[in-house]
Image (cartoon, helix red, strand yellow):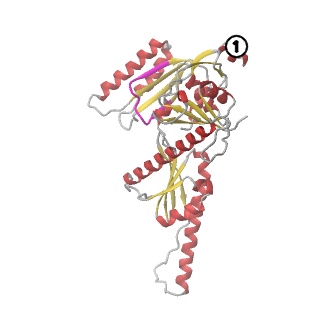
């Protein structure tokens, strides 16, 4: 999961109200159940010491949950009587969790937003493409790339001679120009979209032409899917399943690659990999002290957070700055923090990782991940 969308939470001081709530409406008494959930959130916040104004801001936001099209859950973060971030969840939370703490309680998000990567979907035909962005929260159309109009034959039949050859050559040139235009538009949208995967769908010939014109780094994360169309009203059910499978496979491959780098990087000097080659010690961090040190130095490229992380709730010491985090109070004071405050290790590390544009991957229970449930693959080593 990319953490950039969390940055608004770190632009202001706490304390923070953080609420995770199931918003499914699959039963006849859904409205009644939703009211009970909202009351439970209010009770937990008040009992935790939240001020009345911030509590009311959270409740007002939850009260405006739409009846139709609601996500399975929501996470709401508020401070200073204002909701700062409202995140639709891909997975409903188990129970209701509302906290009042110095840092926003963001640690549950990786397991609730969903691991599927954001992806661009290009619906391609002979005349152009519609480009859609799908992320964990929603799908939205980004841009339409219209190619040149295909040459017409008019009302007169074209004889099968050199005129036919010229006509067909002109059509091919027009199709090639359209493919160039679509590929260029996708390359332009790619860095600013935040997508990690590109799906090409639509007419087979045209999508292959676009694929071969993409930059190499984008082709490496591009898949083709059938059953998609630009036509209005076209059924998307089969395509949606194909896209879901592609996103799931991408996420699994990415996790396996990150765990492989982590396991290799945490070997001790003198240990050997499968081919008898010395590993490069120091390009992974494991455990709260090592991960905190790496986060403070902006070394974390990928943060690994175990679903059964026993060390995640361990107390650490923080200051107002995103890099001011330490295992011991004296260490925080040595950094210049005048009044260190306690915080959860996972929330503090996620704050630092988000500020440094790192990503976080959730390690499932039973997987061979970091001891204690907290580890990192580093961008660079000292």
Query: Quadrant of residue 284 in the image?
Result: top right
Q: Position of residue 7 (x, y in %)?
A: 60, 31
Query: Quadrant of residue 96 in the image?
Result: top left
Q: Nearer the viewer, residue 53 or 198?
A: 198
Q: Nearer the viewer, residue 141 or 332?
A: 332
Q: Which residue is mark 1?
A: 338
Callout 1 secondary element? loop
Going by the picture, which residue comes out furthest to the left? Answer: 28
Left or right of 335 on screen, residue 78: left
Mark 1 surroundings: few (<14), some (14-19) or many (≥20) residues within 10 A: few
**178 up-or-down from 60: above or below:** below
Q: Quadrant of the C terminus?
A: top right
Left or right of 41 on screen, residue 174: right
Residue at 53% x, 43% y is 256
Is any atom of residue 180 visible in this view? Answer: yes
**Residue 98 lies in the magenta stretch:** yes
Residue at 40% x, 32% y is 92
Q: Position of residue 85 (x, y in %)?
A: 52, 29
> Which stretch is magenta?
86-99
């Amino acid at each position: 999961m990319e953490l950039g969308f969390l940055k608004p939470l770190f632009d202001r001081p706490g304390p923070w109200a953080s609420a995770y709530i199931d918003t499914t409406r699959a039963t006849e008494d859904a409205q009644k159940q939703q009211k009970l959930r909202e009351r439970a959130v209010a009770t937990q916040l008040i009992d935790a010491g939240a001020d009345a104004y911030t509590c009311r801001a959270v409740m007002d936001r939850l009260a405006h949950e739409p009846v139709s099209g609601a996500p399975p859950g929501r996470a709401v973060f508020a401070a200073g009587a204002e909701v700062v971030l409202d995140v639709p969840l891909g997975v409903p939370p188990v129970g209701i969790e509302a906290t009042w703490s110095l840092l926003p309680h963001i640690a549950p998000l990786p397991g609730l937003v969903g691991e599927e990567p954001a992806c661009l979907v290009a619906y391609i035909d002979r005349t152009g493409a519609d480009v859609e962005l799908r992320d964990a929260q929603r799908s939205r159309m980004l841009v339409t790339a219209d190619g040149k109009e295909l040459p017409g034959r008019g009302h007169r039949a074209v004889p099968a001679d050199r005129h036919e050859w010229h006509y067909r050559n002109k059509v091919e040139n027009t199709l090639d120009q359209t493919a160039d235009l679509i590929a260029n538009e996708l390359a332009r949208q790619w860095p600013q979209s935040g997508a990690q995967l590109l799906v090409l769908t639509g007419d087979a010939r045209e999508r292959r032409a676009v694929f071969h014109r993409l930059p190499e780094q984008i082709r490496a994360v591009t898949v083709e899917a059938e059953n998609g169309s630009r036509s209005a009203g076209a059924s998307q059910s089969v395509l949606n399943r194909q896209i879901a499978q592609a996103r799931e496979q991408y996420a699994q491959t990415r996790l396996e690659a990150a765990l492989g780098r982590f396991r290799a990087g945490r070997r001790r000097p003198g240990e050997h990999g499968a081919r008898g080659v010395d590993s490069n010690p120091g390009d992974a961090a494991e455990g709260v002290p090592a991960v905190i040190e790496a986060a403070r130095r902006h070394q974390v490229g990928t943060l690994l957070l175990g679903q059964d992380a026993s060390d995640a709730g361990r107390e650490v010491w923080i200051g107002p700055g995103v890099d001011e985090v330490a295992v011991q109070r004296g260490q925080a004071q040595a950094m210049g923090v005048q009044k260190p405050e306690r915080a959860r290790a996972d929330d503090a590390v996620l704050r630092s990782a988000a500020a440094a544009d790192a990503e976080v991957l959730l390690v499932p229970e039973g997987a061979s991940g970091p001891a204690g449930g907290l580890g990192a693959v580093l961008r660079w080593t000292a």
